[in-house]
């Protein structure tokens, strides 16, 4: 969900540097004058609209120090009653553009004091990761773009105060056209118990699923692997 918000900010911030538009979400940027920074970008989903197949409410608010395609630009993203289906998203996402080429930008991302509130409780998280946004052959058409998360670590505290971490094992590819991971692997480790899981996002197909393989240590000292399909949010 945070990566989706980053995608929305980069595409809208890049496209709407000097204009406003009214769609779902409605997009506004202040100040509107060309070349005047910092700018505040607001993506307002209102009381709810269907966006990439899910119901989204509230606002994503981003402050950009300069244009997206400028090395050194920083972007701070916060949320105002932002909700994706039944999940309310909170915290601050900080981006720094480290390098820029004709076809891509490389970005460092930090999520601080992240909070996901679901009907059954709250999940808190903090994250650091490095990503590259590739524009492919159509720099103004974002639907064929690719985000590659080359490295990253996230710490979570979930329901019942259970803590776990995630680590990128193989670069995670996100298809901007469907806003879902389509390739790569992530390892999940649970603190305090002998339990790990590997999430495999597939072979590049945007099918909305991932394969999870878990390893559990039984009381007799043996390890057992289980594999199942996970529907992506």
Image (cartoon, rainbow, N blue to C red):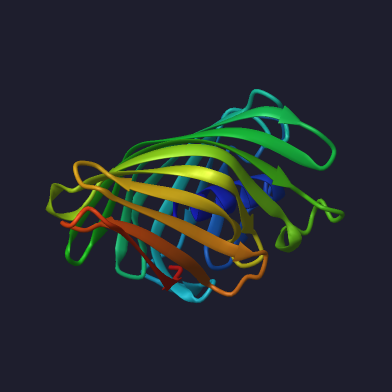
In the depicted structure, whether residue 153 falls above or below residue 137: above
Write the residue at 16% across / 56% down. Answer: 219
Q: Is residue 149 visible?
A: yes
Residue 116 placed where, x, y %?
29, 53
In the depicted structure, whether residue 157 falls above or below residue 120: above
Residue 153 placed where, x, y %?
44, 37
Q: Is residue 18 visible?
A: no
Residue 228 placed where, x, y %?
41, 72
Which residue, as the protein is rendered here, is positioned at the far top?
A: 72
Write the residue at 69% across / 45% down. Answer: 133
In this image, 161 relative to 49: left or right? left
Residue 52 placed where, x, y %?
54, 71
Image quadrant holding the N terminus, namely: bottom left
In the depicted structure, whether residue 9 falls above or below residue 68: below
Q: Residue 8 occupies which quadrant of the picture?
A: bottom right
Residue toward you, 120 or 94: 120
Write the residue at 43% across / 64% down. Answer: 212
Q: Residue 145 occupies which quadrant of the picture?
A: bottom right
Residue toward you, 180 or 214: 214
Residue toward you, 184 or 147: 184
Which residue, as the protein is rendered here, is positioned at the far left?
A: 160
In the depicted structure, whether residue 214 falls above or below residue 14: below
Marker count (numbered) = 0
In this image, 65 relative to 226: left or right? right
Image quadrant holding the C terminus, namely: bottom left
């Amino acid at each position: 969900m945070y990566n989706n918000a980053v995608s929305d900010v980069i595409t809208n911030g890049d496209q709407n540097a000097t204009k406003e538009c009214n769609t779902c979400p409605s997009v506004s940027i202040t100040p509107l004058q060309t070349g005047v920074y910092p700018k505040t970008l607001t993506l307002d989903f209102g009381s709810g609209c269907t966006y990439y197949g899910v119901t989204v409410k509230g606002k994503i608010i981003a402050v950009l120090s300069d244009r997206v395609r400028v090395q050194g630009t920083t972007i701070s993203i916060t949320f105002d009653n932002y909700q994706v289906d039944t999940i309310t998203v909170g915290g601050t996402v900080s981006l720094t553009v480290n390098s820029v080429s004709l076809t891509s930008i490389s970005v460092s991302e930090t999520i601080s004091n992240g909070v996901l509130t679901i009907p059954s409780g709250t999940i808190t998280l903090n994250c650091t990761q490095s990503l590259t946004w590739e524009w492919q052959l159509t720099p103004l058409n974002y639907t064929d773009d690719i985000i590659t998360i080359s490295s990253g670590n996230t710490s979570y505290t979930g329901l019942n105060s259970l803590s776990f971490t995630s680590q990128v094992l193989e670069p995670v590819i996100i298809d901007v056209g469907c806003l879902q991971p389509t390739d790569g692997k992530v390892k999940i480790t649970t603190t305090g118990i002998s339990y790990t899981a590997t999430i495999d996002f597939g072979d590049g197909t945007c099918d909305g699923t991932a394969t999870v393989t878990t390893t559990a240590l039984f009381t007799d000292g043996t390890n057992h692997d289980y594999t199942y399909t996970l529907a992506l949010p």
